[in-house]
Every structure is written in structure tokens, then in C-alpha cells.
């Protein structure tokens, strides 16, 4: 076996395994197929020795007696190997439809070791079948609207149906396939960051896979929204929960709302924050007969927390907040300038801020543009006290715990002194003399302030 072939083999198996066990298809067609394929893969993995010829069989010099030969993959498919500590690329339509499905090996065509050639062929066929079923499932969407081209991409935590042609990023124009991978990576990086800051863990999520449908045209989003998000609206729509508990965002890039790709990135991070807080719900938290917050959105009963968190993570992209979800009020109006630290600081110095106690029970959709900024600042303050407690705070909210108890239990704050404590903190933390205002959990480490990626 050549050193390169030896290096490639485990990767092939890891990917095949991930494909079979990691995918959570929306309509479960692929998982049925996965169940069928698990049988042979199990055999393949446990029937040792897997990569040795049968007794009496010839060695093959062409493939180093592995049944596989190296295959040169198009350089444009290097992105298929992008990964982080907790994620990797599982499927990509561009790779699947390329020569040899983007695999870096082929079955040794004139192999002298028939048993290994057969094993390699079985593996290749299984990957081809899994890919076919996966792609067929994704393409169901295309019946709903007109599309010239769509790139489908699945990573560990996201499934993108991507139809954004040519995108300018850092003076480079990216093709649809490139921008799909860029955004998938950004989503995965956000996912890891969200979990690191809040201490939300996959084990407590209803779903660990999020569907993102992103289109060029509003008409496409309008046509796809009802089927996948259960909603239709000229802007971004989303859902979680319901019978299948799927997490779905359907959006399109309105050039007036998102002139740059960075604006669209920020917008999606805001929306994904709503998704991640929403799916954080483990049935084992509840006693039989107890349901807690249903549907699992924070927006109706904990609007300040819902909006505050979404703005807080949105602002980490590039220090701006521009997203007001369609159910959120004041889509058109704004309060103060774009510098939220300054707006809130000025209000606090003038002792003019909305009452937290009165705002507590407002659903997100009733918050004004001014109130949104204070919700963000309250969350900023709470995170500065105990960012790691965020998961616990969301969990308590899902159990319909009154806010005053959440404040006491997680942040050691009383309702009576909350506003005073927060105002004192704002006076220092947001002071114009402070060059690095507010709270950034990464500030203490050597990564410095958040950077756009
Ligand atoms: Zn790809
Ligand atoms: Zn061979
Ligand atoms: Zn929102």
C-alpha cells in the first residue's frame, strides 16, 4: 500500500461513516438508505483483515494491493476538505456532480487482487448511492420555484440550499459554489462560538442540524417559504419545533437591505441565534405532563432576552446591528445613530431608559427600535457577569421560570437593583473614553477583538 493510499483510507471511511450516521434529512429518505448501507459498512469495518488479499491471491502493483488508485481531484474541490474541530463537509452537490464525485481514489481498473477490487467497488457504489439519495432529497425544493442553478451543501450542523450567484467578498468575486462554502464555514464557526460562550451543548438541542435556504430572488423565497418554513413573507422566515422539530431559515438577499455580503452575513447570524436558542430544549428537563415553553421560541414570553441575544451575536460579526426580524416591530424606524454603545450610554447619563420591569413581558414583536437597543445592552451586561450561565438561563426560560428568578439564580441579581447595577456598569463600560466598550469574552485571550471572517 502506498503511503498516500494508506493516508487516504481512514479519511474515506470517516467520511462514509459521517455520511451514513451524521445526516438528518428533512424527509428521512436518506436515513432509510443509510440504514440499509450500515449493514455492509459494519461488515466492511469488522471483517478483518479488510485490506489484505485472500490466501493465494496475487499482489497488485498498480494499487499497492489496496483495490484503490489515487485520483486527481479538481482544485476547486479543495474546499470539500475544510473542517473545524467539531465539523466537516459531508455532502456537496458540486463535488457529487464532478468527475468521480470529488473522491480522491478510484477502483483499481485492472486490479490483480480481485477481492480488494470488489471491496473498493462496493464502497464506491455505496457512496454513489448515498450521494444520489441525498441529492434527490435536496432537489425536491426545485419543484417549487424557478432556479437556474442551486448549490446544495451539508456540513455537520447545516444544510444549505444556496442560490446566490456571484458574490463580492474582499474585492474577490466568488462563484455560487465558493460562497456556499464560505457561508457554511462562517455558520459552523458561529455555531462553535455560540456554544463556547453560552455553554449550550448538542445533547440538549432538539435538533443539531439547521436548514438554510438562501436565494437570489424574493419570488423564490416566497415560493419555498410555505413548504419548508410554514410561512411566506417578503423577508426572511424561519421555524423550529412542530411535529418534525426541524430548524429552517428561508431567506433571500435583498440588495436594498443587504448591499454588501457582510450585511447578509450579519443578518443570517442574527437569525441563526434565534434558531439556536429555540432548539435548545431537552425533553428530559420536564416531568411527565409538563411542556414548558411551547413553541420553543423565546420571543413571546422573553422578548428582551430573545432580541438581546440575537443582537449581541449579530454585533460580533462587525460591530453593527441592522436586523429586525419581520415579526419584530419598527422595521423601518431607528433610534439614535449606529453606535449602540453611545446611544445607551447617553441615555443612561441622562437617566432616561425604559423600565426593565415593564418591558419584561413584552414579546419581541412589540419592542420598539429604542427598546431593542436596551434589550441588547441588558444582555451585554448579563453576559459580562456570567456568559457561561446563558445556557442555564435559556433552560430556565424554557421551563417558564419568571425572569426575576432567572436573574437571581444565574446572575445573582435582584429585580430591585437590576437597573441600577446595569446603569452603573454602562457608565464605565460604554464610556466614550473606553476604546473597547462593552463585553467581549475573547478580550482576555490573545485573539483580541472580533474580526469579520
Ligand atoms: Zn463543494
Ligand atoms: Zn489493483
Ligand atoms: Zn430577531
Image: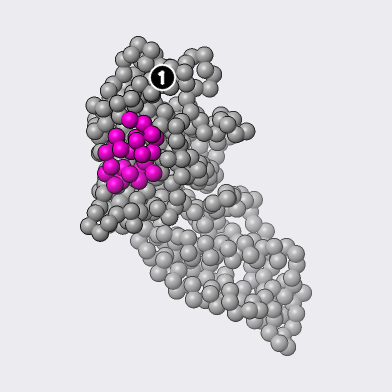
Q: What is the span of residues highlighted in magenta in the rendered image?
A: 392-414
Q: Is residue 187 above or below residue 354?
A: below
For the C terminus, the quadrant is: top right
Q: Is residue 444 left or right of residue 343?
A: right
Q: Residue furthest right?
A: 61
Q: Residue at x 30, y 29 (%)?
A: 415
Give the percent coordinates (x, y) of residue 329: 27, 29
Tell me, yes or no, whether the highlighted magenta stretch contains residue 309: no
> Mark 1 sits on what residue?
424
Tell me, yes or no, whether the highlighted magenta stretch contains residue 412: yes
Towards the viewer: 446 or 146: 446
Give the percent coordinates (x, y) of residue 413: 36, 31
Q: Residue furthest bottom?
A: 56
Q: Residues within 10 Å of mark 1 (few under 14, many from 20)?
A: few
* Residue 177 visible, this angle: yes
Towards the viewer: 372 or 330: 372
Towards the viewer: 22 or 381: 381
Amino acid at each position: 500500500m502506498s503511503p498516500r493510499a494508506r493516508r487516504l483510507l481512514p479519511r474515506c471511511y470517516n467520511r462514509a461513516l459521517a455520511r451514513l450516521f451524521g445526516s438528518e434529512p428533512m424527509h428521512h429518505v436518506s436515513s432509510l438508505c443509510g440504514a440499509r448501507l450500515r449493514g455492509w459498512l459494519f461488515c466492511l469495518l469488522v471483517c478483518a483483515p479488510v485490506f489484505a488479499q485472500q490466501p493465494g491471491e496475487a499482489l497488485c502493483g498498480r494499487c499497492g494491493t489496496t483495490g484503490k488508485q489515487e485520483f486527481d481531484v479538481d482544485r476547486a474541490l479543495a474546499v470539500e476538505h475544510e473542517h473545524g474541530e467539531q465539523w466537516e463537509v459531508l455532502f456537496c452537490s458540486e463535488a457529487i456532480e464532478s468527475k468521480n464525485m470529488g473522491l480522491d481514489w478510484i477502483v483499481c481498473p485492472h486490479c490483480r487482487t480481485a477481492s480488494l477490487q470488489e471491496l473498493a467497488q462496493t464502497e464506491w457504489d455505496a457512496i454513489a448511492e448515498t450521494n444520489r439519495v441525498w441529492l434527490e432529497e435536496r432537489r425536491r425544493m426545485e419543484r417549487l420555484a424557478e432556479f437556474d442553478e442551486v448549490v446544495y451543501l451539508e456540513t455537520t450542523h447545516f444544510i444549505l440550499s444556496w442560490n446566490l450567484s456571484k458574490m463580492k467578498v474582499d474585492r474577490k468575486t466568488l462563484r455560487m459554489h465558493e460562497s456556499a462554502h464560505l457561508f457554511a464555514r462562517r455558520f459552523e464557526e458561529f455555531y462553535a462560538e455560540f456554544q463556547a460562550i453560552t455553554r449550550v451543548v448538542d445533547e440538549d438541542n432538539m435538533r443539531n442540524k439547521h436548514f438554510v435556504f438562501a436565494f437570489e430572488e424574493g419570488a423564490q423565497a416566497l415560493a419555498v417559504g410555505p413548504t419548508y418554513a410554514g410561512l411566506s413573507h417578503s423577508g426572511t422566515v424561519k421555524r423550529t419545533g412542530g411535529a418534525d422539530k426541524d430548524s429552517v431559515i428561508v431567506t433571500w438577499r435583498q440588495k436594498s437591505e443587504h448591499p454588501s455580503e457582510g450585511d447578509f452575513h450579519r443578518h443570517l447570524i442574527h437569525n441563526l441565534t434565534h434558531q439556536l436558542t429555540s432548539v435548545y430544549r431537552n425533553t428530559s428537563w420536564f416531568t411527565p405532563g409538563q411542556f414548558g415553553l411551547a413553541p420553543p421560541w423565546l420571543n413571546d414570553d422573553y422578548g428582551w432576552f430573545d432580541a438581546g441575544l440575537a443582537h449581541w451575536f449579530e454585533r460580533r460579526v462587525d460591530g453593527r446591528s441592522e436586523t429586525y426580524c419581520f415579526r419584530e416591530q419598527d422595521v423601518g424606524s431607528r433610534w439614535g445613530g449606529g453606535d449602540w454603545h453611545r446611544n445607551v450610554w447617553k441615555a443612561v447619563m441622562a437617566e432616561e431608559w425604559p423600565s426593565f420591569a415593564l418591558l419584561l413581558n413584552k414579546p419581541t414583536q412589540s419592542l420598539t427600535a429604542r427598546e431593542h437597543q436596551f434589550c441588547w445592552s441588558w444582555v451585554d451586561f448579563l453576559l459580562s457577569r456570567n456568559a457561561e450561565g446563558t445556557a442555564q438561563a435559556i433552560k430556565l426560560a424554557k421551563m417558564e421560570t419568571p425572569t426575576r428568578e432567572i436573574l437571581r439564580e444565574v446572575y445573582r441579581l435582584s429585580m430591585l437593583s437590576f437597573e441600577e447595577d446595569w446603569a452603573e456598569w454602562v457608565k464605565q463600560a460604554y464610556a466614550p473614553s473606553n476604546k473597547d466598550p462593552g463585553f467581549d469574552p475573547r478580550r482576555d485571550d490573545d485573539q483580541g477583538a472580533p474580526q469579520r471572517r
